Image (cartoon, grey):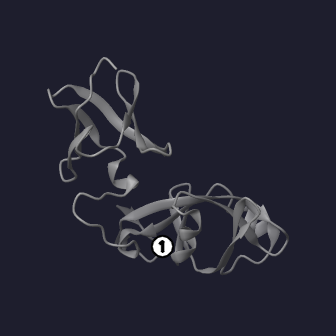
Amino acid sequence: MTRDDDGASGDVIVLGEVVGAHGVRGEIKVYSATRPRENIFDYSPWRLESSGEFRFRALIRGRRQGKGLVAQLEGIDDREAALSLRGSRIGVLRSQLPALDDEEYYWADLQGMQVITRQGIDLGIVTGLMETGANDVMVVRGDRERLIPYVPDRYVVSVDAAAGVLEVDWDPEF
């Protein structure tokens, strides 16, 4: 849980990051972890996190610019203000995201989960996920780093979100 500027406690999910300024009118360059990446523009306000503090900013508009994304935020009107946001993580409240069906999880829900094998061997913690085209892959760090495909009913046996445990059918030697 993260404390927001308005004093309310909310579950903030990070969707991207401000990577720079675009032009002189306060537009920002955006990295988006959403798929498709333009979906980040479906959410407003954004909660920009820098140094552990969140600030609300309404999204005025967003667009694709070449290979990247560019956004205009309320109250950010010049290049210096845009540059001051560089490195800020872009988050939204979980309540702003679409509801999921049973057995569906956002990547943010899986990160930090303990990964154990069917035999109870601790493989470590999910520290990240990545897309490979064929399927998503979990980055699990324990005694060493492992890349485990996120394929339910094949490699992922169960996910216990309440306990923070993900059970896998995986050879610990691999």
Q: Quadrant of the C terminus?
A: top left
On screen, residue 103 versus residue 65, left or right, reads: left
- Along the line of sight, the residue nearer the viewer: 85 or 136: 136
Counting the numbered discs, the total is 1
Which residue ends up furthest to the left in the rendered image?
A: 119
On screen, residue 156 versus residue 30, left or right, reads: left
Q: Residue at x 33, y 49 (%)?
A: 110
Disc 1 residue type (three-letter): Asp
- Along the line of sight, the residue nearer the viewer: 139 or 12: 139
Which residue ends up furthest to the right in the rendered image?
A: 24
Q: Residue at x 60, y 58 (%)?
A: 17
Which residue ends up furthest to the front in the rendered image?
A: 134
On screen, residue 77 versus residue 41, left or right, reads: right
Res 80 quadrant in image: bottom right
Q: Residue at x 27, y 37 (%)?
A: 155
- Name the residue tied to disc 1: 5
Where is residue 76 shown, x and y percent of the image?
Answer: 71, 76
Where is residue 139 shown, x and y percent of the image?
Answer: 42, 36
Where is residue 1 shown, x and y percent of the image?
Answer: 34, 61
For the residue carrying disc 1, how many other residues have a C-alpha within 10 Å: few (<14), some (14-19), or many (20+)? few
On screen, residue 86 versus residue 103, left or right, reads: right
Task: Relative to 132, say whether 30 is above or below.
Answer: below
Res 61 quadrant in image: bottom right
Task: Relative to 164, say whether 98 is above or below.
Answer: below
Give SS at disc 1.
Answer: loop
